[in-house]
Image: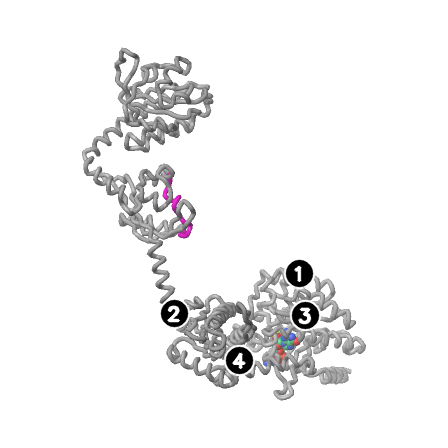
Amino acid sequence: MERDDVLPVLYDLAVTIGSEISVKPLLTRTLQRLLYHTSFSAGFICLDVPPCRKADGQLEVRLDAVVGDFDLIGVIGKTIALPCALICETAGPETGQAALLSALRCAQTQYRVYLRLPIDHCGVIVLLAVERPETKLPLTTMLQPVLAHLAKAIMLCRNNDAHTSGLINQRDLLEKVFESSHSGVMITDAEGRIVEVNPAFTRITGYASDEVYGRNPNLLASGRHDHEFYREMWDDIRTSGHWEGEIWNRRKNGEVYPCWLNINPVQDANGALLYYVGMFSDISKRKEAEAQIHQLAFYDPLTDLPNRRLLIERLQQAFAFGMRSGQHGAVLFLDLDNFKTLNDTRGHDVGDQLLSEVAKRLNKCVRDGDTVARLGGDEFVVVLESLSSAPDEAAAQADAVAEKIRDDLSMPYLLADYTCHTTPSIGVVLFRGQQQSLDEVMKFADTAMYQAKTAGRNTIRFYDPVMQAAVEARAELEDDLRNSLELRQLELFYQIQMDNRNHPIGAEALLRWRHPVRGLISPAQFIPLAEETGLIIPVGLWVLRTACAQLDTWQGDELTQNLTLAVNVSAKQFRQPDFVAQVRRTLAESGAKPGLLKLELTESIVLEDAEDAIAKMRELKEAGVSFSMDDFGTGYSSLQYLKRLPLDQIKIDQSFVRDIVTDSNGAAIVQTIIAMGEILGLNVIAEGVETEVQREFLDLRGCHAFQGFLYGRPVPIRDFEARLKEENNVRL
Ligand code: C2E
Ligand code: MG
Ligand code: MG
């Protein structure tokens, strides 16, 4: 051992010695540490070595501690005769080893070398090695300071042991209890190192006592509790002197199990902390039984779905949630249309298989927080939560899930040796909080389901006729919208944009749907539906194509050749991975000048995935297209992200323009927006300008482009062009 290595060894030993309070562990741990740092493989300690030498050169000694050798451990506590030299003389490793070592009969063949370390007058440590240890410094001198320290510690610990030995009988008794207890017992010292465990501990945890001595009890931790849990536990122990509770631990084989744990600190007469005692019992069996009872009480054994009882509980929770959040929920009551016939003709086995499969499909149709329950027979109930607070929208959402369920359950079922078909009838009731009682809601759903059956099965019916009408109208609108493109019912209207000298600078293309029955439908009504159904993609492309074709036509006329055309782009449309390519292709095919096409985006489009939006905008800008931020001021409007966007224009939302003259707040917002535009070098246009007063206010504050009823409503192309000519004639 090198000189530099010595300091950590001494330190480690000193710490070891200083932390023990009883002789036996003190000796054992000292030996352990010595072997750990040196190249000796075993060692023993004898205390109270008799001073006199016997005539035959032999000495009767008792091995008080042994480490590293199983044979020697067998004679621990017994008296054996050893050569005096081994115990008393300062014999170096060289002298008479063979003779001395052969006295250790139990292990005589192994050891070749020994080293003797006297512990002052207390006793002696003998270290044994199989080969010559690589000890450069004489360990005897090197360890002298700690050996003196050890001698003192032995004295102190003996006093302590003597003090406690008065309680020896009581301890015998306690030891028996400890050994035979069914509860696991684990004792740690004040620093939380395990010093004792009982056989039940080993039985429960799988760890032998040797494997845990000196270790921290967190080796049992399962990882299921967070830091906070343990912090609270220790807080409790410190403040109330006790902790009791359920905790998940991990066995040596990795298995996680629940146990009931009690922790109590043990103090000496002066209140100084000596030990912590933990007692625990394995409660996994009890838990399993509880879980089984719970499963039987709350779940349907065939499908594993919640049963009626759990459904009621979940519904109560859903009602309470609806009360708090103001959101709607829905109950879908469903029944399989031809189940009884199938059950009667094909037998219960087939019926059961079908029901299990239906349960699986239902679970796939709903979101995580929703409930699918089986009431019995072929009746199932689905509870949807967190639907919209607007009744129409909530009805549409519930309807969408009901339709998905109807479609999925109508697919063929491949049972073991039979393929079968069935369809559901579904009754739907919306609820919000406790407006109706739970019984009522269930009754309504049931009634609605019967209406669905009467209406011809494989059908969805809302209990509320208004809802039913709303859902039907929506479904009809959706169908019509699907056909609108083919039937050429869509049309673009054009609304003029002016500068402050009353010169037309461009137009915004606004979509209209000329419905054969309903007349002209506003985009505010059908754009959201188109977004939801994905129809916005073909519709958006049609708008773009029509607008570009118009731009190209305008090239041929002096009056229109410099007009820009603004086209609204919706979120879903912009998010398509090939949106950039679509615009490029459309421009190329139409022959329109890209510089005259302006795309109007909204803040939400950009915020959703800023990086993607910026990349797409850059590419299109390179192609010459420009961008305007529509409805500006209604969203985030943060300078932070605005700075990063390659925009050309911001469009002040009409709600601010409307209030400009009446509301000082509105006026302030408009001024701020104009200032923002200036800072960012963007041009600013105001939409919804209806009065001369509004126009003047805006113009005076630096916004010199306008769109609104003051100049004209959105009109068909023929009216728009006629109007341009008229104005031109006036000017001429
Ligand atoms: P937007 O892009 O903000 O369009 C401006 C809306 O304000 C238009 O409604 C226009 O008619 C209306 N407006 C214009 N001037 C005035 C005015 O002085 N006073 C008032 N009160 N209103 C005025 P419209 O045409 O009903 O369009 C509504 C929204 O539908 C548009 O808002 C836009 O978000 C969307 N939209 C329209 N066409 C399309 C389209 O082709 N694609 C997409 N994705 N959305 C479109
Ligand atoms: Mg717009
Ligand atoms: Mg707008």
Residue type beneath disc 1 = Ala
Q: In the rendered structure, which disc, 4 or 2, sits on the residue that comes first in sequence? A: 2
Q: Quadrant of residue 484?
A: bottom right
Are dots 1 and 3 in contact, CB under 8 Å? no
Observer-nearest residue: 416 or 635?
416
Which marked residue is nearer to the observer: mark 4 or mark 2?
4
The residue indicated by pointer 3 is 599
Q: Is residue 55 visible?
A: yes
Inter-mark Cα distance, 4 to 3: 45 Å
Q: Earlier in the sequence, mark 1 or mark 2?
A: 2
Asked if the residue at tag 3 contacts the one at tag 4, i.e. Cβ–Cβ closer than 8 Å, the answer is no
User: What is the x, y in percent for residue 382?
Assistant: 46, 73
Distance from label 1 to label 2 (Cα)? 51 Å
The magenta region covers: 215-226
Q: Earlier in the sequence, mark 2 or mark 3?
A: 2
At label 2, the amino acid type is: Leu
Sooner in the amino-acid sequence: mark 4 or mark 3:
4
Amino acid tagged 4: Asn
Judging from the image, what secondary structure is the residue with disc 1 in?
A: helix
Q: Which residue carries the number 1 mark? A: 615
C-alpha separation, residue under disc 4 versus residue under disc 1 = 47 Å
**Residue under pointer 2:** 310
Residue named by callout 4:
458
Is ligand 2 less than 8 Å from the beta carbon at label 3? no
Q: CA distance from mark 1 to mark 3?
A: 15 Å
Pointer 4 local density, CA inside 10 Å: few below 14, some 14–19, many at least 20: many
Residue 50 in the image, given as x and y percentages of width and height: 26, 18
For label 1, count other residues whose C-alpha is less than 10 Å away and answer few (under 14), some (14-19) or many (20+). Answer: some
Query: Under tag 4, what secondary structure?
Result: loop
Sequence order check: which comes first, mark 4 or mark 1?
4
